[in-house]
Amino acid sequence: MEVVLEMTLPRNAESAPLVRHTLDASLRGLGVASEIRADISLALGEACANVIQHAANGMEYEVRARMDGTRCVVEVIDGGAADDEPGAVRSGAVRPGPETVNWDDAQASLLAEHGRGLQLMRAFTEELRIADRVHRGGAIVHFEKSLAS
């Protein structure tokens, strides 16, 4: 069985718990272990928090998730940042140009107030990729997680 979720959400703090609970309920319905659900929920929460903090005011964002019984694939897509220009800082990552981002160099101190979200997503998921949207503002956070215990 394959389950696909697609949500368009307002860029506000109330939207993150809604999308986390919706995805968790779907994973629970597929019989996914609570530890794996918690990892996915944490990564999703960090990706949503990034969009909520950095996307332009009044914009919406999208969350797409696909679960096929063996793997969960999630994409969080924002429509652009208010400071979306070459050289702007986003989640501790330096944006060297309009379509390239050196996300791998984004490291935050353990005591830093911001920037740990990327480290958490890397630690709790597989296949983490973050890319600028070509010919549009914003970014796509893509991560995958095996559903096997």
Image: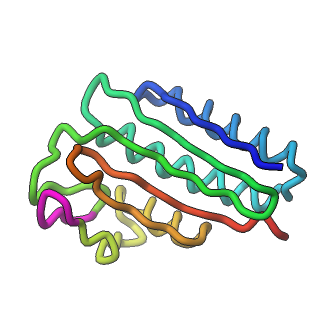
Quadrant (top left, top right, bottom left, bottom right) of the C terminus = bottom right
Q: Residue 103 at x, y = what percent? A: 31, 69
Which stretch appears magenta? 93-100
Would you say the magenta stretch is mainly helix, strand or loop?
Answer: loop
Q: Is residue 6 left or right of residue 130?
A: right
Identify which residue is drawn at 29% across, 42% down: 54
Identify which residue is drawn at 61% across, 67% down: 124
Q: Residue 143 at x, y = what percent? A: 54, 61
Question: Looking at the image, what colour scheme do you see?
Answer: rainbow
Q: Is residue 134 left or right of residue 34?
A: left
Frontmost residue, 129 versus 33: 129
Q: Residue 69 at x, y = what percent? A: 81, 57
Q: Residue 9 at x, y = what percent? A: 48, 28
Q: Is residue 11 left or right of residue 37?
A: left
Q: Residue furthest bottom?
A: 105
Q: Is residue 84 left or right of residue 142?
A: left
